């Protein structure tokens, strides 16, 4: 199976480096953003959609629980992790 490599941090656009910092603070990891950095415009559109929703729901469900749920859905759908 082919895999997409992670871009070196210094090649990640500055706006996504900022997103990585936010993920590090909230979730303790952000290396996956370096993979999405291959398509920075597309990932920025996702961020523009997702972050406001996540902030609106903040406190209702812990971010770590949200990410664990996302992981379990991916596993249930046979996504390779």
Image: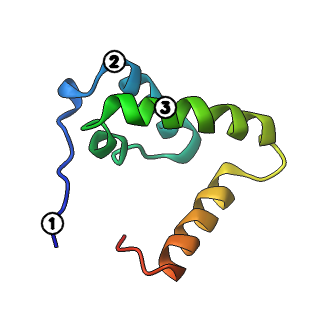
Q: Which residue is mark 2?
A: 14
| Residue found at the far right of this picture | 60
Residue 2 image label: 1
Residue at 60% across, 35% down: 49
In whole angstroms, how far apart are the C-alphas of marks 1 and 3? 25 Å
Considering depth in this image, is 3 or 62 the residue closer to the camera? 3
Whether the residues at callouts 1 and 2 have beta carbons within 8 Å, the answer is: no
Q: Which residue lies most toward the top here?
A: 14
Q: Nearer the viewer, mark 3 or mark 2?
A: 3
Residue count near mark 1 (Cα–Cα under 10 Å), binned few <14, some 14–19, many ≥20? few
Identify the residue under disc 3.
45
Q: Which marked residue is nearer to the observer: mark 1 or mark 2? A: 1
Report the Cα–Cα distance between label 3 and label 2: 15 Å
Marked residue nearer the N-terminal end (1 or 2): 1
Q: Secondary structure at mark 2?
A: helix
Image point (53%, 33%), residue name: 47
Q: Is residue 18 above or below residue 26?
A: above
47 to 64, vertically: above or below: above
Residue 27 drawn at (x, y percent): 54, 46
**N-terminal-most mark, 1 or 3:** 1
* Number of marks present in the image shown: 3
Q: Secondary structure at mark 1?
A: loop
Mark 3 surroundings within 10 Å by alpha-carbon count, few (fewer than 14), some (14 through 19), many (20 or more): few
Q: Quick one: quadrant of the C terminus? A: bottom left
Among the 4 quarters of the image, the one containing residue 11: top left
Asked if disc 1 and disc 3 are in contact, CB closer than 8 Å, the reply is no
Residue at the image position 67 percent from the left and 60 percent from the top: 65
The answer to whether 38 appears left or right of 65 in the picture is: left
């Amino acid at each position: 199976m082919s895999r997409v490599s992670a871009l070196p941090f210094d090649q990640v656009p500055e706006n996504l480096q900022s997103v990585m910092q936010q993920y590090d603070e909230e979730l303790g990891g952000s290396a996956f953003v370096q993979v999405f950095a291959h398509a920075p415009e597309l990932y920025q559109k996702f961020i523009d959609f997702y972050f406001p929703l996540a902030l609106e729901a903040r406190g209702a469900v812990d971010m770590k629980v949200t990410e664990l749920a996302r992981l379990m859905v991916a596993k249930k759908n046979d996504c390779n992790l």
